[in-house]
């Protein structure tokens, strides 16, 4: 029914991921109301592990000498370390800034593809990345680029996470093409889920349980695990196989727009500048999806 080899489903998948991941930064913030950043990150991974366990057990036979290290790297670089980096960063920066800085991912996807896999992007993909990031930059600075100088060191944790995402996308594209998105997602969480559970058990869970908004925080984390990790990663990993790592990672350009939509629910105002930046972002995503020069009408 959902054929990701068709363009319309690729764009539908892109919008779905952006919608969910646009909300994930707010969900992390809500998780931090009662939990520590370590607890939010570890519980997100551990809950994802539990949800996927039946599939993971079914797919264990697919692990072999050739793909074990690639799967482990995907688990660590695409999920484990970024989960902790993002929650730690959000203890000091806003969720919207974290979400918008996530737009650096396609840049590092291109760089990692070039340096590690000798994959040279075409001219339209290169232009698309630049255009898309320009649109994201408008949102980051609200049109005042001098504000870049005021980003604190915790924002660099998000940049580090996007570097990891870039490497992860290329590993999936070039090293794990024989596995489906569902198989990859279930196996990587099987590898990182138990360590995350151990880390969670070593934290002061008792103190979190005593917090008056513990129920809300843990529910936000469960929703984050179910939609922000499991379901969207199914879609993302499959999309990479049907398009390119660059196009799939370009979802991070649309995430700021959906972050703004979620912000409306909190009373935020959407102005002309945001609408213009969204148009620029969508143009960048379209160009990054092109594998060759488009035919002229």
Image (cartoon, rainbow, N blue to C red):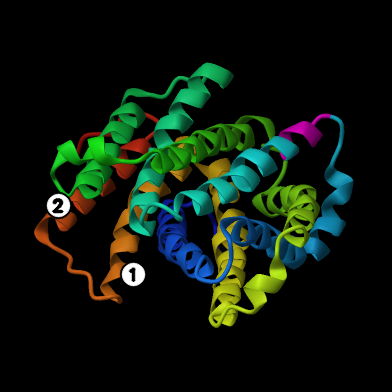
- Left or right of 163: which side holds 271? left
Relative vertical location of residue 149 with respect to residue 256 in this rendering, above or below: above
Q: Is 37 contained in the magenta span?
A: no
Quadrant of the rendered image containing residue 240 = top right
Mark pair 1, 2: CA separation: 18 Å
| Residue 227 on image: x %, y % | 56, 66
Q: Count the labels in the image.
A: 2
Q: Examine the residues drawn in magenta and state their main secondary structure.
A: helix
| Residue 72 on image: x %, y % | 74, 38
Label 2: how many Cα within 10 Å (few below 14, some 14–19, many 20+): few
Quadrant containing the C terminus in the rendered view:
top left
Relative vertical location of residue 290 with respect to residue 274 in this rendering, above or below: above
- Left or right of 42: which side holds 2? left
Badge 1 marks a residue whose secondary structure is helix
Residue drawn at x 16%, y 57% as measured from the top left: 275
| Residue 81 on image: x %, y % | 61, 43
Name the N-terminal-most of marks 1 and 2: 1
Quadrant of the rendered image containing residue 56 = bottom right
Q: Which residues are magenta?
A: 66-71
Residue linked to disc 2: 276
Badge 2 marks a residue whose secondary structure is helix
Residue drawn at x 29%, y 38% as measured from the top left: 133
Residue linked to disc 1: 262
Relative vertical location of residue 47 with respect to residue 273 in this rendering, above or below: below
**Is residue 118 something that shows in the picture?**
no
Label number found at residue 26: none
**Is residue 148 something that shows in the picture?**
yes
- Left or right of 269: which side holds 140? right
């Amino acid at each position: 029914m959902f054929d990701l080899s068709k363009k319309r489903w690729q764009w539908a998948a892109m919008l779905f991921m952006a919608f969910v991941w646009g909300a994930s930064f707010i969900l992390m913030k809500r998780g931090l109301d009662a939990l520590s950043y370590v607890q939010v990150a570890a519980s997100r991974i551990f809950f994802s592990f539990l949800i996927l366990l039946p599939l993971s057990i079914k797919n264990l036979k697919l692990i072999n000498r050739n793909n074990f290290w690639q799967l482990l790297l995907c688990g660590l670089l695409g999920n484990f370390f970024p989960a902790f980096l993002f929650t730690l960063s959000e203890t000091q920066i806003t969720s919207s800034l974290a979400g918008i800085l996530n737009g650096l991912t396609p840049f590092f996807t291109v760089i990692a593809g070039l340096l590690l896999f000798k994959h040279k992007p075409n001219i339209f993909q290169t232009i698309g990345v630049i255009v898309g990031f320009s649109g994201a930059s408008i949102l980051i600075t609200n049109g005042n680029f001098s504000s870049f100088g005021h980003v604190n060191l915790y924002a660099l944790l998000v940049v580090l996470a996007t570097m990891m995402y870039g490497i992860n996308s290329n590993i999936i594209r070039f090293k794990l093409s024989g596995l489906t998105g569902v198989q990859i997602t279930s196996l990587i969480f099987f590898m990182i889920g138990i360590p995350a559970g151990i880390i969670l058990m070593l934290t002061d869970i008792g103190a979190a349980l005593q917090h008056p908004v513990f129920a809300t925080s843990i529910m936000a984390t469960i929703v984050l695990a179910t939609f922000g990790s499991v379901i969207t990663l199914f879609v993302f990993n499959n999309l990479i196989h049907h398009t390119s790592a660059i196009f799939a990672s370009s979802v991070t350009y649309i995430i700021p727009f959906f972050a703004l939509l979620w912000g409306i629910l909190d009373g935020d105002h959407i102005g002309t500048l945001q609408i213009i930046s969204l148009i620029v972002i969508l143009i960048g995503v379209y160009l990054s999806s092109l594998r060759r020069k488009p035919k002229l009408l």
